[in-house]
Amino acid sequence: MHTLGTPPNAWTVDETTADLTRPPLPPQPITLTTETKTLRLDLAKAAILVIDMQNDFCHPDGWLAHIGVDVNPARSPISPLQTLLPQLREQQVPIIWINWGNRPDLLNISAAARHVYNPTGTGVGLGDPLPKNGAPVLTAGSWAAAVVDELEQQPTDICIDKYRMSGFWDTALDSILRNLGRTTLFFTGVNADQCVMATLQDANFLGYDCILLQDCTATTSPDYCLKATLYNVNQCFGFVADSTALIGGVGSGE
């Protein structure tokens, strides 16, 4: 028999038979304490999304810094992610990097979306070269859209370019998660109140279990924006925990 597809969404086939039973992955139950409830979840059904931890948003030579934004808050998830991601890889939890990376020709980007990044039409906006290094702003394949050097990516990780604040909008993210059988999602990255929140909301609407890891998430927006985000996640869309509690749960197992 030969395997077709990605387990657990895989068949086994030969010349005469196709086995559609899709055996599940062995369960990896853990307990995780969040701000509102204690969760029992299965790491074999979990994935972590790392959103927009890229040079344009987190590097002092990137686009946000160029327009005068203090990017130090956006760098705060780096250290906890450096600790957390290797431990999740050891448990075979998929690491999914979701970076804003536009087509160079911007053919799928509306005028309204471009206005957010260049409201006067005279500044450095989407696709324009950054003055310090010439990298085109938020363009797929460029330094501007690359993950910051401090966060190591592995060949087994999954990388997805997005083109809106939500990582689900017009991307392969939902199809990949469904093929992998991952229904519980940990959310990390920047900005908490923008791309992280938009992606988390869409995940909730699609039926995923959503857990925001507060210490692995940050924003360059005012503090009240972060407070509202955390409130809304707890109230409407999922749960809020931190990486220390997750690492503790992974270490203890069941």
Image (cartoon, rainbow, N blue to C red):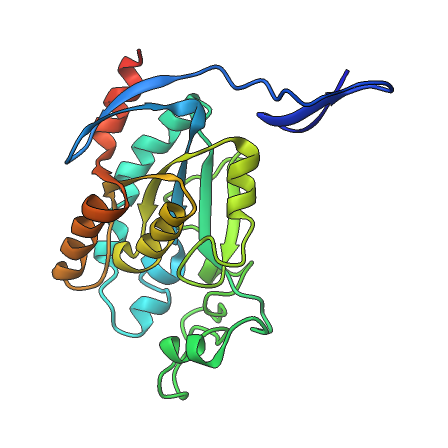
Using the rendered image of the protein, determine whether residue 51 is visible from the camera's viewpoint: yes
Q: Picture coordinates of residue 215 (x, y %)? A: 21, 41
The residue under the point 57% across, 25% down is 8
The residue under the point 41% across, 79% down is 124
Residue occupying the far right of the picture: 15
Q: Picture coordinates of residue 53 (x, y %)? A: 37, 51
Which quarter shows the N terminus? top right
* Front residue (pair 78, 51): 51
Q: Looking at the image, is 215 positioned above or below residue 90? A: below
* Front residue (pair 202, 109): 202
Q: Picture coordinates of residue 90 (x, y %)? A: 42, 22
The residue under the point 36% across, 76% down is 116
Q: Quadrant of residue 180?
A: top right
Q: Picture coordinates of residue 31 (x, y %)? A: 26, 20
Using the rendered image of the protein, determine whether residue 53 is visible from the camera's viewpoint: no
Q: Looking at the image, is 77 positioned above or below residue 35? A: below
